[in-house]
Image: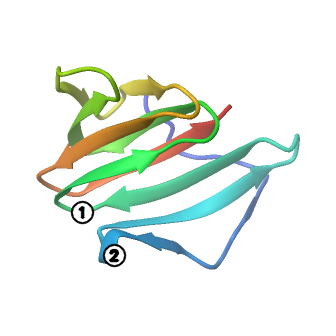
Amino acid sequence: MTTEKIDNVSVSTQASVYFDGKCISHGILLADGTKKSVGVILPATLTFNTGAPEIMECVAGSCEYKLAGTDQWRTSSAGEQFGVPGNSSFEIRVAAPYHYICHFA
């Protein structure tokens, strides 16, 4: 199931822009203190580093991803998600805009 709406949040109006504009996101804060980001990745192959564990939820589009320490590319499409351990990294390949919610642990 794809998250279509997140109620009762504070939104950071200043966008975080990464990789020369290939990834743009906005931070959101839920009433209970939970932090997330929502954004889009444009066609590219990028490497992200994590501090805390993350769950990447695909809202629209699709991507291929490869977790650090593995050689296998996997696919994630709308309504699917994948987890990334903390203090790690992942590569992501996107052929068309990939809309996501990043859930931070």
**Residue 55: x and y, percent?**
51, 31
Please, which residue is most extreme toward the front here? 69
Task: Write the residue at 45% across / 58% down.
Answer: 39
**Residue 24: x and y, percent?**
42, 68
- For label 2, the residue is 21
Residue 1's disc is none
- Give how far apart the Cα atoms at labels 2 and 1 are: 8 Å
Q: Is residue 17 left or right of residue 68?
A: right
Which residue is nearer to you in this view: 47 or 1? 47
**Residue 53: x and y, percent?**
59, 30
Task: Write the residue at 11% across / 52% down.
Answer: 95
| Amino acid type of the residue tagged 1 in the rendering | Leu
Task: Write the residue at 59% across / 38% down.
Answer: 103
- For label 1, the residue is 42
Which quadrant of the figure contains the C terminus? top right
**Residue 74: x and y, percent?**
20, 24
